[in-house]
Structures are given as C-alpha cells and as structure tokens.
Image (tube, rainbow, N blue to C red):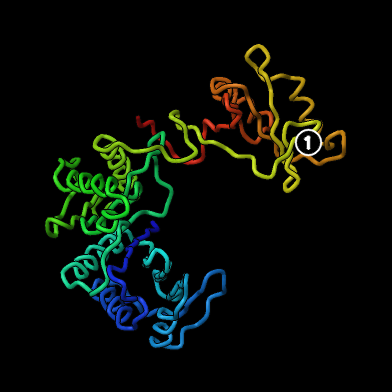
C-alpha cells in the first residue's frame, strides 16, 4: 500500500538559512537518524529527465543553488522499496517542503514522528515546522459527501503533527484566522478522540494524532479516515470543497467545448459532445437516442466525427433515475443542469459515503 509522508519547513527569520549547506547537512542527518535512508543516487529537476548524482557534495550544491523557485526530486530507484524525497522552495513564501514516498505505511508513519521530535527538541536556528505535517495513503480512500476541508489538517492523512508555533506568522497578517487556529489547536489537544485513536503530546505546543496504528491494513486505513472525517465535522465548522454543492454533486466545466448546430456542445479536441434532453414520460427520448446513435456511427450531418456523448438532463432527479438507462444505451455519463446553467455530476468519481 503506497504511502506519502510530508513535512513542511518555514524560515522564521530574515536570514536565508535554506541557502546554507549546513542546513541541508543537518536535515539529511536528521532524516537518517529518524530511519529514512538518504543514499540517493539520482536527481530530477522540474519537467526534466532524471540524472545521476555524483556525490553528497553534488546534492548539496543543487539544494543550495540560489533561485526564486526550485523543485528538486532526489531518489534511489534501485532500493527496495524505492526512495524518493522532494524539495520545493518558493522565495516569496519563504518555505520549503520535504516529501517521502514509499509503499510501507508503518515505516512512513514511524519516521515522521521521530523526525519531528528531533527538530522540536533540537531546534535549528531560523527553521520551524510548517502547518502541513502528515502521513497519508496514496491509494484511493473513501470520502464523506459532500467533501469538506479543515483549515489546516489534511483530511485524508492518517497521522497529523500539529504545532502551535506554526500559526504564529498569521498573527500579524490575519489575526482573526490566527485566533481561530489557536482555538482549533486547543480542541485537537483536549477533546475526546474516537476509540482507537491515539494522541501524543510532545509538550503543550506540539501534538501528534495517530488516526490509524502503524500495523493498520489498507481496510483499516480507510476505516480510520472515515472516522477522522466524521470527528472533524462534529467538532469544527468546515467549508465545502470547491466545485461541490451540498448534495455532494461536482460541478463540471466543459472546457474546450463550443455550441454546435447538431449537438448542444462539441469538443474538437477529442470529438466528444454534450447533449441536452428532456425525458419523455419519465424515460429517455427515443428520437434523441436514435439520432445520437446514428451520428456516432456515421458522424454528424456536417461531417464531424462523434465519439463520446455526455447526456445533460434538466434536474437531479432525472439524472439519478435515468443514469443506468443512459449508460446502457451508450452515453459516456449523465449530468444535470442547475438553475444558473452550470453542469453537475451526481455520481462524481471516487468512493463516497453520505456524511452530513
């Protein structure tokens, strides 16, 4: 089961510690002590092919090279399991992220707390933890519907590290959000957690919440994530994810499609289309079905090839009740049109559980 661990680091001062070799030497040493092997052999810059690293000095040269933005991935593809670390820096935001990818949930969920504890107990000047420190599965996992997002926790992370000091930069620029984050931190630090969930307080300012045990199976991780999402909704007011309505239906934007004389919208790029239809006696209009079937076989009357067609129905009830019939007759999918003219998918991709 593939897993993803992420630690974010942020400059605390005006001194550019991320331009100093000693910072990266310390970071690589701390990762090694936490159990993360760093014997990387290749590097890859953004949108480039991997190249072989010559030495540890070569790696440090790459990491400390001045740039307004950099994205560097270092890896050991011959290791089993393969190792991959990525470093992303943005000068304006003055932050760096480090990611670890691997197939072992137990390993990832163990190295992250060890690394965080060392960073916290042996603070590095000018360096602190960011607000997104977590481990999460990389395989598909269920979501409550409609999906909602927390202010700083990653919804699909089975292990979260939260530190009060990570909110400090917000105090000046966004004092209301800063106070809200502090209140949420107190809830995370003190509220009763679901059975089986473990909270570790490193000190009053740093907590680690283990929503799933290191030995959890894939099924166990999925169950833990559903438990986490329900607990978060119970204790926090969370906004819906963009593009979803309260029914959990996802907005679909027909990019690259234009009005067409024979179908509602046509996409030249892949010869697909959207076609509106008003149901006939609670069923799909047979005349429209015959017309679309003929055009898919022979092309539209103006000679355009027609491949996949998505059906647009006037309301959600029609889209839900007629979806099976539409798919059986060859439609690619079924959407409905809202009052504002937007398209909604009542069956968005993914595994969903009714939540609110």
Residue at the image point whose x is 18% and y is 50% from the top: 198
Residue at the image point whose x is 78% and y is 25% from the top: 290
Quadrant position of the N terminus in the picture: bottom left
The residue at the far left in this view is: 203
Q: Is residue 96 above or below residue 220?
A: below
> Camera-side residue: 222 or 237?
237
> Camera-side residue: 224 or 169?
169
Residue at the image point whose x is 75% and y is 43% from the top: 271
Q: Is residue 53 left or right of residue 152?
A: right
- Secondary structure type for disc 1: helix
Q: Is residue 263 above or below residue 224?
A: above
Q: Position of residue 145 (x, y in %)?
A: 40, 34
Q: Is residue 148 above or below residue 131?
A: above
Q: Position of residue 352 (x, y in %)?
A: 42, 36
Q: Is residue 295 above or below residue 38?
A: above
Name the image quarter holding residue 143. Answer: top left
Q: Is residue 100 left or right of residue 299?
A: left
Name the image quarter holding residue 230. Answer: top left
Q: Position of residue 11 (x, y in %)?
A: 31, 69
Q: Position of residue 93 (x, y in %)?
A: 39, 63
Query: How many dots with numbers?
Result: 1
The residue at the far front in this view is: 172
Q: Which residue is mark 1?
A: 296
Q: Is residue 133 left or right of residue 328?
A: left
Residue at the image point whose x is 39% and y is 88% from the top: 57
């Amino acid at each position: 089961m593939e897993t993803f661990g992420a630690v974010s680091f942020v400059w605390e001062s005006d001194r550019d510690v991320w331009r100093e070799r000693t910072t990266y030497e310390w970071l690589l040493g701390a990762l090694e002590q936490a159990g993360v092997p760093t014997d990387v052999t290749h590097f890859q810059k953004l949108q480039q092919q991997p190249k072989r690293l010559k030495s540890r000095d070569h790696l440090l040269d790459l990491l400390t090279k001045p740039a307004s933005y950099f994205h560097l991935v270092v890896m050991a593809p011959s290791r089993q399991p393969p190792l991959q670390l990525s470093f992303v820096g943005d000068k304006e935001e003055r932050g760096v992220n480090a990611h670890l990818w691997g197939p072992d949930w137990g390993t990832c969920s163990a190295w992250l707390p060890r690394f965080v504890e060392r960073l916290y107990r042996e603070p590095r000047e000018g360096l602190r933890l960011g607000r997104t420190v977590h481990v999460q599965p990389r395989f598909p996992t269920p979501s409550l519907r409609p999906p909602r997002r927390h202010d700083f926790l990653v919804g699909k992370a089975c292990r979260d590290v939260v530190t009060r000091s990570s909110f400090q930069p917000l105090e000046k620029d966004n004092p209301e959000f800063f106070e809200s984050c502090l209140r949420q931190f107190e809830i995370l630090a003190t509220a009763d957690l679901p059975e089986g969930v473990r909270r570790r307080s490193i000190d009053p300012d740093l907590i680690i919440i283990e929503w799933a045990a290191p030995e959890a199976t894939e099924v166990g991780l999925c169950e833990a994530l559903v438990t986490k999402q329900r607990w978060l909704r119970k204790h926090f007011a969370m906004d819906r994810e963009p593009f979803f309505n309260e029914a959990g239906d996802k907005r679909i934007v027909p990019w690259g499609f234009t009005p067409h004389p024979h179908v509602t919208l046509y996409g030249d790029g892949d010869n697909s289309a959207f076609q509106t239809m008003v149901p006939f006696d609670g069923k799909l209009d047979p005349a429209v079905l015959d017309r679309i079937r003929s055009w898919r076989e022979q092309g539209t009357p103006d000679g355009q090839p027609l491949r996949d067609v998505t059906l647009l129905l006037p309301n959600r009830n029609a889209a839900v009740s007629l979806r099976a019939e539409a798919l059986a007759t060859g439609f690619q999918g079924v959407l409905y049109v809202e009052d504002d003219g937007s398209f909604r998918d009542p069956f968005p991709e993914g595994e969903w559980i009714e939540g609110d």
